[in-house]
Amino acid sequence: MSFCKPVGVLLFLTMLFLSGMAPALEVKVMNYNIRYGSADDGANSWTNRSALLIAQLKEQAPQVIGMQEALRFQINEIRKALPYYGEVGIGRDGGEEGEYSCILYDTRRFTLTDSGTFWLSETPEKRSQDWDSACVRICTWALLKDKETGEAFYHFNTHLDYRSAKARLNGVHLIAKRIAERKTNAPFVLTGDFNAAENSPPVKWLKGEAEEQPPVVMVDTFRVLHPDEKTVGTFNRFKGDKSGAKIDYILTSEETTVLDAGIDFSMPDGRCISDHYPVTATIRFKTVAPPFTSTKRCSSISLPAA
């Protein structure tokens, strides 16, 4: 029985495709502005809420976390309590100085293969501030590889400016450009406190809803599963408010499957854990089989006779 018969060819190609297809990569992602720990927040100061935040992370068990406003001592405390998390990032003022937009990743599952931080400015490779921003702003990224499957993905994480609309829009332009220019075609996720509502120019632009199209169109993982949800306020001001705008995001490419997504409105004993609620998403990245490169002729392969 020759492989060149239609049934044999179909069977051969199906087996070849399946053998080259890596298992789908599923990841639980969290975005969390944890409120900078040096703030004079009285009863809501870091010392009064750090244990609650650590317990929340244990319960949610995200495999990667994009954090905003994290200071060095806060990261140290979190990692001491949860030592299986590795860390990527630097302070926005350089080295360990200033707020981090760090990425924490579960080292039991992932290996860090590449990473970096760039500034949201006209000179992104050095500490700098542009576009009338109130603060220095950065984006940290990591390329993480699954230890079991070998599949990899990029995680970009940022905190956009609260004052300057120009800085927010130019910031996402730069981030999208960097995502489009990433070194490999591995899929990506973008997390961040954007300080911008869902109908704002930077968010609409990233989602391809503006006149000018981004180099990579993204979807809001929360809205994929909850398109009509009204209670989405992620900035609670330590008041437990849920009625405001959603300004915290987990975005990814249109090809990615969203399995679960939500906003964690937890308030243990009626207390806010941070002045932002964390957002979560479990996503399945699209896996593409490697191309078939064999040069053997079909006629040279045969099956045993039935």
Image (spheres, rainbow, N blue to C red):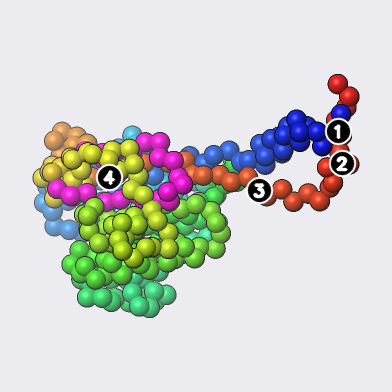
Q: CA distance from mark 4 to mark 3?
A: 36 Å
Numbered badge on residue 290: 3
User: Which corner quadrant of the image does residue 173 belong to?
Assistant: bottom left
Q: Earlier in the sequence, mark 1 or mark 3?
A: 1
Q: Name the secondary structure under disc 1.
A: loop
Are there few (<14), some (14-19), or many (20+) residues within 10 Å of tag 3? few
User: How far apart are labels 2 and 3 at the CA level?
Assistant: 23 Å
Name the kind of residue labelled 3 in the image: Pro
The residue under label 2 is: 299
User: Is 134 above or below relative to 104?
Assistant: below
Give the residue at x 42% y 66%: 177
Compared with residue 18, is residue 168 higher up or lower down, i.e. above or below? Answer: below
Question: Gap between marks 1 and 3, in whole Å?
Answer: 26 Å
Nearer to us: label 1 or label 4: 1
Q: CA distance from mark 1 to mark 2?
A: 7 Å
| Residue farthest to the front, as pictured | 6
- The answer to whether residue 82 is left or right of residue 262 is right
- Asked whether the viewer can see residue 23, the reply is yes
